[in-house]
């Protein structure tokens, strides 16, 4: 089945099972057939913070995921057993395209405290734990006091540095800790495969963008297999992974992105920035298969890169809406 | 902790209170304050400010000498009017200008005032403060009138509350509740402005009678009512009730045309979708139409009082004003109206359990000395009666 056909079926599936979703689509006057993926009705991702949206019965809920938002209510994403299994399977399949089929020795660019201390168990911790499944013999770059553990890193490189190994971390942590540490100690990371995510905002004041990041790692540490990725809890299991050449994020074959004009909401042409909509056939237990994010992005090309489909970049978050009402309820209601 | 007026400087709460309390006294309608407000009004009406912040022009008009005199004339009566003393104002975090109305009327009443501005205030508030500082020439004004800002600090709020003879709390239910925790002196009281909401009514008969020019002018006035303050002010209409029939189609087309320039920022455009889709998910909306980038129309049996985003309007229909009476709640503040006679409106208003003002289209955000049902100058003064034995 084509992506469009699957998504159309999924739209009907959610309309039949989620009353709130059906009410929204009815109010919009949405039909039941669509000419293109861009014609599918989308939900703003923040709706998962303000509303409980699920297409399964209460007693089928197996897992409730929450987002890491720093303000306001978190998103709540409801998975049944099948959805939980499907997301793990699809995430693995997507990552294997860059990691290969074997589980590799893994360097975690985070503090071991992030998974040890259950009281502060956070979305960051969940991200680290989730990713840990894709490697083995994990070594953490920071000890529980957030101090770089040079000997641990040196040890991993001595044992496994001559074969492919996996490096994982949030973009900001990777730059702040691993890059500096590797440069300072002359570590050779040339057999590493780096997966990183989290955005460039925290690095903007250091004038570090993706190109600088890739060049600096290649020149100073030999690390060239670098893959940024983009994903969100509201579409758990779907990640958009950067190609080896660093020419943009690619869509898995069960997903797509649409870059939208924030005034007309029409699809933007290649090269024109807009708001990112993420599309995936994975969400079956909640109506999250077509979501408008609050991120800005740009599509660089279609079917012109190392893998088929669109390649795109994330440009950052939409600036927050500043509202000047007399009753100061905006902060309480919005994210 | 920063003082913003009369001069930008740091402050400590105890010395600040001492200075304000020992300032020379002012009278009700004190000429020095009238003078100051007049100069301030002229600064606000300067073309550069009016262009950058059109909403400040109405503030400028409000503070002109003639308007101020009219407000003072309302105080005539047999009783003596004296200032209440020290008034502590806490304006809403996000409305740049409302603090000026509250403060100016209190100053006109001869009070010593301390206004706490939110540290989140910006934009128009800066322009207002610049204009105030530029208008300053009298030492008494500088001593007795202070505008300050501080991040959450319970000890400062407690000290200012304890010293106040009257505390003025804006900013909705949540702020009123959280500030009420700070005790006032036994004789003092609060003047509170909790969450309110507003809507518009259009007489189908009146609309049919109106000329094309009148209809367009109505749409333009309504556009200002809606889009100033991103439709988030208490007095901003959240929806329209058509009374005795509907010309919603024509009105929506006109509104979309006059609001061509009100294209929202991307984040606001997303917020509107979140608001409207959420209301639909709750089953409060039967149909949504995106008339233009600026205007979103929601068909709903009743006005949705929650703020859904700038430029989101419900359209509902009732047969008569009487049918609307039971739909009005205490929380309702302003009804903006078109096409009704004064007699119809007066008769309607008498039957309502809420609503403090009924104003024509285009005047929703025009501040008046009577606000939320309070005559502010009366609230800001203390009445003294002098009785002698008659022989």
Image: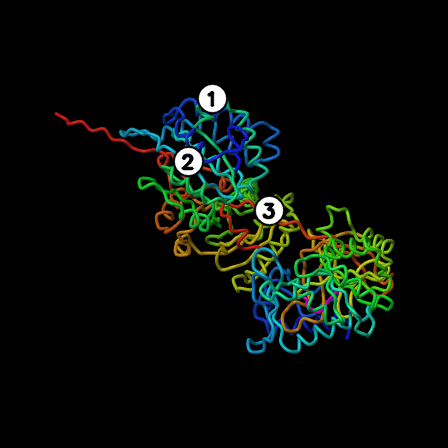
The magenta stretch is A235-239
Q: Nearer the viewer, residue A299 or A41?
A: A299
The residue at which mark 3 appears reads as A322
Picture layout, residue A291 above or below residue B240: below
Q: On residue A63, which mark appears?
A: none
The residue at which mark 2 appears reads as B369
Q: Nearer the viewer, residue A199 or B360?
A: A199
Same chain, labels 2 and 1: yes
Check if mark 3's residue and mark 2's residue have beta carbons within 8 Å: no
Check if mark 2's residue and mark 1's residue have beta carbons within 8 Å: no
Q: Residue at x 38, y 42 (%)?
A: B191
Q: Chain of mark 2?
A: B
Same chain, labels 3 and 2: no
Q: Is residue A183 rendered to the left or right of residue B26?
A: right
Q: Residue at x 68, y 66 (%)?
A: A235
Q: Judge the density around disc 1: few (<14), some (14-19), many (≥20) Cα neighbours within 10 Å.
A: few
Q: Secondary structure at mark 1?
A: loop
Q: Position of residue A138 (x, y in %)?
A: 74, 68
Q: Say whether residue A6 is visible.
A: yes
Q: Position of residue A268 (x, y in %)?
A: 76, 55
The residue at which mark 1 appears reads as B138
Q: Is residue A168 magenta?
A: no
Q: Residue at x 64, y 61 (%)?
A: A45
* Sooner in the amino-acid sequence: mark 2 or mark 1: 1
Picture layout, residue A230 above or below residue B340: below
Q: Chain of mark 3?
A: A
* Quarter holding residue B88: top left
Total marks shown come to: 3
Picture layout, residue A103 above or below residue B35: below
Picture layout, residue B314 above or below residue A13: above
Q: CA distance from mark 3 to mark 2?
A: 28 Å
Q: Position of residue A96 (x, y in %)?
A: 80, 71
């Amino acid at each position: 089945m084509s992506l469009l056909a699957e998504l159309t079926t999924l739209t009907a599936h959610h309309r039949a099972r989620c009353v709130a979703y059906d009410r929204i689509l009815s109010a919009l006057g949405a039909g039941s057939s669509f000419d293109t993926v861009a014609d599918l009705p989308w939900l703003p991702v923040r709706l998962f913070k303000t509303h409980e949206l699920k297409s399964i019965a209460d007693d089928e809920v197996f897992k409730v995921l929450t987002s890491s938002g720093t303000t306001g209510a978190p998103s709540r994403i409801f998975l049944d057993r099948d959805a939980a299994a499907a997301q793990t399977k699809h995430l693995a399949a997507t990552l294997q395209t860059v990691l290969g089929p074997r589980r590799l020795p893994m360097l975690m660019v985070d503090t071991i405290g992030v998974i040890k201390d259950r009281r502060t168990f956070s979305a960051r911790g969940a991200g680290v734990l989730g990713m840990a499944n894709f490697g083995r013999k994990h070594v953490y770059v920071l000890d529980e006091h957030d101090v770089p553990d040079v000997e641990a890193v040196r040890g991993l490189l001595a044992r496994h540095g001559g074969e492919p190994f996996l490096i994982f971390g949030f973009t900001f942590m990777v730059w702040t800790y691993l890059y500096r540490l590797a440069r300072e100690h002359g570590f050779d990371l040339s057999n590493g495969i780096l997966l990183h995510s989290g955005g460039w905002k925290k690095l903007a004041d250091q004038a570090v963008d993706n190109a600088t990041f890739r060049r600096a790692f290649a020149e100073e540490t030999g690390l060239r297999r670098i893959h940024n990725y983009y994903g969100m809890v509201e579409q758990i299991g779907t990640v958009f992974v950067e190609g080896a050449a660093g020419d943009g994020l690619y869509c898995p074959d069960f997903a797509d992105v649409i870059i939208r004009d924030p005034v007309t909401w029409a699809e933007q042409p290649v090269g024109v920035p807009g708001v990112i909509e993420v599309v995936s056939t994975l969400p079956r237990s909640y109506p999250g298969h077509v979501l408008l994010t609050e991120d800005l992005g740009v599509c660089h090309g279609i079917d012109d890169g190392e893998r088929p489909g669109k390649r795109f970049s994330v440009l950052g978050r939409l600036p927050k809406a500043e509202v000047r009402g007399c009753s100061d309820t905006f902060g309480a209601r919005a994210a | 902790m920063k003082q913003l007026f009369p001069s930008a400087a740091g402050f400590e709460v105890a010395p600040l209170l001492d200075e304000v309390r020992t300032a020379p006294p002012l009278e009700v309608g004190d000429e020095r304050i009238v003078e100051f407000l007049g100069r301030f009004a002229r600064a606000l009406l300067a073309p550069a400010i009016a262009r950058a912040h059109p909403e400040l022009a109405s503030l400028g008009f409000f503070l002109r000498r003639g308007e101020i005199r009219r407000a003072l004339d309302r105080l005539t009566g047999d009783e003596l009017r004296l200032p209440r003393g020290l008034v502590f104002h806490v304006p809403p975090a996000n409305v740049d200008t409302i603090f000026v109305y509250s403060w100016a009327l209190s100053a006109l009443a001869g009070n010593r005032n301390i206004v706490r501005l939110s540290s989140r205030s910006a934009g128009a508030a800066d322009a207002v403060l610049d204009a105030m500082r530029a208008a300053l020439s009298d030492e008494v004004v500088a001593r007795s009138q202070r505008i300050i800002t501080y991040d959450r600090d319970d000890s400062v709020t407690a000290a200012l509350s304890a010293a106040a003879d009257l505390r003025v709390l804006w900013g909705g239910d949540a702020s009123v509740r959280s500030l009420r925790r700070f005790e006032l002196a036994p004789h003092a009281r609060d003047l509170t402005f909790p969450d309110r909401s507003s809507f518009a009514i259009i007489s189908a008969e009146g609309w049919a009678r109106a000329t094309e020019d009148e209809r367009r002018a109505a749409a333009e006035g309504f556009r200002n009512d809606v889009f100033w303050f991103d439709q988030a002010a208490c007095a901003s209409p959240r929806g329209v009730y058509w009374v005795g029939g509907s010309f919603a189609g024509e009105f929506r087309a006109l509104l979309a045309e006059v609001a061509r320039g009100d294209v929202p920022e991307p984040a606001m455009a997303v917020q509107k979708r979140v608001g409207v889709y959420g209301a639909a998910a709750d089953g409060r909306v039967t149909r949504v139409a995106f008339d233009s980038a600026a205007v979103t129309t929601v068909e709903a049996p009743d006005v949705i009082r929650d703020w859904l985003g700038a430029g989101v309007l419900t359209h509902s229909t009732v047969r008569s004003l009487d049918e609307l009476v039971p739909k009005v709640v205490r929380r309702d503040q302003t009804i903006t109206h078109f096409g009704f006679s004064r007699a119809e409106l007066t008769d309607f208003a008498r039957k309502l359990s809420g609503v403090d003002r009924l104003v024509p289209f285009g005047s929703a955000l025009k501040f008046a000395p009577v606000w939320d049902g309070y005559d502010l100058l009366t609230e800001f003064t203390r009445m003294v009666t002098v009785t002698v034995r008659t022989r």
